[in-house]
């Protein structure tokens, strides 16, 4: 899937009316012995595996005008080297890898009328290190940290955002 920033403005209407695929339905119901916890106030994400905390990392979250959603979710899709599409210069440009605006790992967790939300890397570590509220609702992590998270969880892992 090609991604334009975090929210996909070109396909928002299609996603808002899309029916979840069988894989996504199963991912939401699959019993998974791990979970991801995102504390928006502390701007920190962690993973619990078999009852033990494994990793805790700083994050940047959604701007107050485009907030990161609250609630219970599940990882819908994991993608290595997602493609970021930019039309800023008036020309279509596709970027992927650690220097793209979404880094080299992407974990989708929610779709609604605004688009798709994910946990992803960033080439701008300052925003994560300062735990800023700057995104369009996605959760930004340092590239090294999102790779660790990516390797620890599977599609279907529950995500609690509070």
Image (cartoon, rainbow, N blue to C red):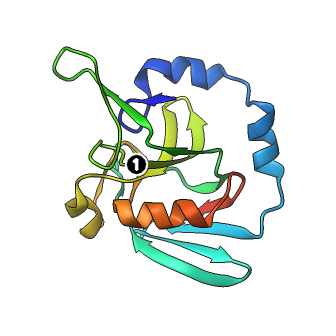
Residue at horizontal 63 percent and vertical 60 percent from the top: 159
Give the x, y percent position of residue 96. 35, 38
Report if residue 42 is visible in the image. Answer: no
In the image, residue 72 lies at what x, y percent?
66, 56
Label 1 crowd (10 A; few <14 / some 14-19 / many >=20): many
Say which residue appears at 76% left-offset and 47% top-offset.
27
Look at the image and tell me in which quarter the C terminus lies: bottom right
Instruction: Place residue 30 in its image quadrant.
Output: bottom right
Above or below 111: residue 33 = below
User: Is residue 41 or residue 138 the one in the foreground?
Assistant: 138
Residue furthest top as drawn: 90
Residue wearing tag 1: 104
Residue at 69% across, 59% down = 157
Name, please, the residue furthest toward the left: 89
Front residue (pair 113, 109): 109
Asked if 16 appears above or below 22 in the picture, the reply is above
Q: Position of residue 2 (x, y in %)?
A: 45, 28
Identify the image quadrant of residue 110: top right
Q: Secondary structure at mark 1?
A: loop
Tell me residue 41's x, y (percent). Answer: 42, 70
- Residue at the location (19% across, 14% down)? 90
- Say which of 39 and 57 sits in front: 57
Residue 106 shows in this picture: yes
Compared to residue 115, the image places residue 79 above or below, namely: below
- Left or right of 16, for residue 69: left
Tally of numbered tags: 1
Q: Residue furthest bottom?
A: 52
- Toward the viewer: 6 or 105? 105
Residue 113, above or below 110? above
């Amino acid at each position: 899937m090609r991604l334009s920033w975090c929210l996909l403005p070109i396909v928002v209407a299609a996603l808002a009316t899309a029916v979840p695929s069988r894989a996504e339905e199963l991912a939401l119901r699959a019993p998974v012995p791990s979970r991801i916890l995102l504390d928006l106030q502390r701007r920190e994400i962690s993973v619990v595996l078999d009852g033990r905390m494994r990793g805790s990392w700083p994050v940047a979250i959604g701007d107050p005008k485009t907030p990161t959603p609250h609630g219970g979710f599940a990882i819908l899709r994991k993608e290595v080297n997602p493609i970021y599409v930019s039309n800023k210069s008036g020309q279509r440009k596709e970027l992927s890898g650690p220097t793209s605006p979404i880094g080299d790992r992407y974990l989708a967790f929610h779709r609604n009328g605004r688009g798709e939300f994910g946990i992803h890397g960033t080439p701008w570590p300052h925003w994560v290190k300062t735990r800023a509220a700057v995104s369009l609702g996605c959760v930004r992590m340092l590239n090294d940290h999102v790779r660790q998270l990516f390797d620890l969880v599977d599609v279907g892992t529950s995500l609690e955002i509070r």
